[in-house]
Image (cartoon, rainbow, N blue to C red):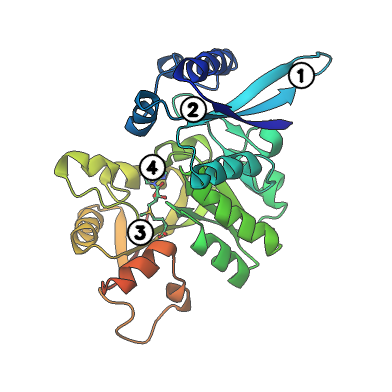
Amino acid sequence: MRIYLLKMQRYDEARAIGVLLCRILHRNRMVSEKKRKFAPRNRRLANNVLKKRPVWVFAAFKTAKNYSFFQIIGQRCLCHPAMSRKNKLRKFAEILSFPNVYECYNVQEPSLVGANMEPVEMKGVWHRDHFKNDHPITLELACGGGEYTVDLARRFPERNFIGIDIKGNRLWQGAKNALDGGLHNAAFLRTRIEVLSAFFAPGEVSEIWITFPDPFPRESKENRRLTSPMFLERYREVLVPGGLVHLKHDDPHFFRYSLRVIESDPRCTLLYENQDIYATPMLYPELGIQTLYEGKHLAAGKTIKYLRCTIS
Ligand SMILES: C[S@@+](CC[C@H](N)C(=O)[O-])C[C@H]1O[C@@H](n2cnc3c(N)ncnc32)[C@H](O)[C@@H]1O
């Protein structure tokens, strides 16, 4: 496996390699038909192109067996020459070799690759193929840097934890901490949470933590809130009957919304709710684990809310 960071000085060069990458990725079913054609994907990239700033293209190449050419098996395109962007690309490249990370490149046709981009099928076999034990599995959704995944894995060696987020550079931090700490009971999955049931069999998950998900305050984005009825249904598909769901959040509107959804769902039972976990002694010590966003909210003087419920 070889990782390349290519700096393109001109848009047409970047476009040429983008077209090539996307064609090959499409042939390997790693990008959808919609994304087959390469185009600047975001405003920042478009801006850099207009301002004729260099464009960075990241590509992972794997030497094809018995062939003397390279097969391109993964790509990300970023657009800023600044060091932070390059670090992000390095993290994307490094995470490909981590044995505790699985990535889904195409949510339209969900499939996973594991270390060194080897295709893997994990649904229903996380115990056998990854953890090598039959301990219960807890997911941390929207895990960002995976603070809960790593800390819980350290506190509860008799349980397994999987942090899930769509942002690879954030996952990198959690995965690296888990590897450095020798935590064999912590793994990470880069995917959209919408397609959870593509990667977990019914009843394969015992518990779910949702830590400071984006609140999506606009009504039109309700379906993207991780506690919307649509998402609760996704969790029900993979949880054991009566599986626990924990939510930690700072935003009072989002928290009220989540309570409303849970209380109006006859298959959910609210077990505990706390509007300010730091105001009184903590009932559950693991509530004291702080994530990156929690630290920011506390510094801004916000109160941290918590609820736990079951889903049947
Ligand atoms: C506000 S951050 C919180 C990160 C972390 N839990 C913390 O507290 O520091 C929300 C995270 O949710 C992730 N996210 C939002 N919607 C998602 C989705 N549908 N699928 C996967 N990840 C998602 C984002 O990538 C982001 O890392």
Residue at the spot 30% in from the left edge and 53% down from the top edge: 267
Q: Earlier in the sequence, mark 2 or mark 4?
A: 2
Q: Amino acid at mark 2?
A: Asn
CB atoms of marks 1 and 3 within 8 Å:
no
Dot 4 lies on which element?
helix
Disc 4 CB within 8 Å of nearest ligand 1 atom: no
Query: In the image, 166: left or right of 252?
Result: right
Disc 3 CB within 8 Å of nearest ligand 1 atom: yes
Report x, y in % for residue 103. Answer: 57, 38
Q: Which residue is mark 1?
A: 64
C-alpha separation, residue under disc 2 versus residue under disc 3:
25 Å
C-alpha separation, residue under disc 1 versus residue under disc 3:
42 Å
Residue 106 disc label: 2
C-alpha separation, residue under disc 3 versus residue under disc 4:
18 Å
Residue at the spot 44% in from the left edge and 65% down from the top edge: 291
Q: Earlier in the sequence, mark 2 or mark 3?
A: 2
Dot 1 lies on which element?
loop
Q: Earlier in the sequence, mark 3 or mark 4?
A: 3
Q: Amino acid at mark 4?
A: Arg
> Which quarter of the image is occupied by the N terminus?
top right
Q: Amino acid at mark 1?
A: Ala
Camera-nearest residue between 284 and 141: 141
CB atoms of marks 2 and 3 within 8 Å:
no
Classify 10 Å Cα crowding around label 2: few (below 14), some (14-19), many (20 and above).
some
Report x, y in % for residue 80. Answer: 45, 37
Q: Nearer the viewer, mark 3 or mark 4?
A: 3
Q: Earlier in the sequence, mark 2 or mark 1?
A: 1
Residue 234 disc label: 4
Residue at the spot 20% in from the left edge and 64% down from the top edge: 252
Q: Which residue is mark 3?
A: 212
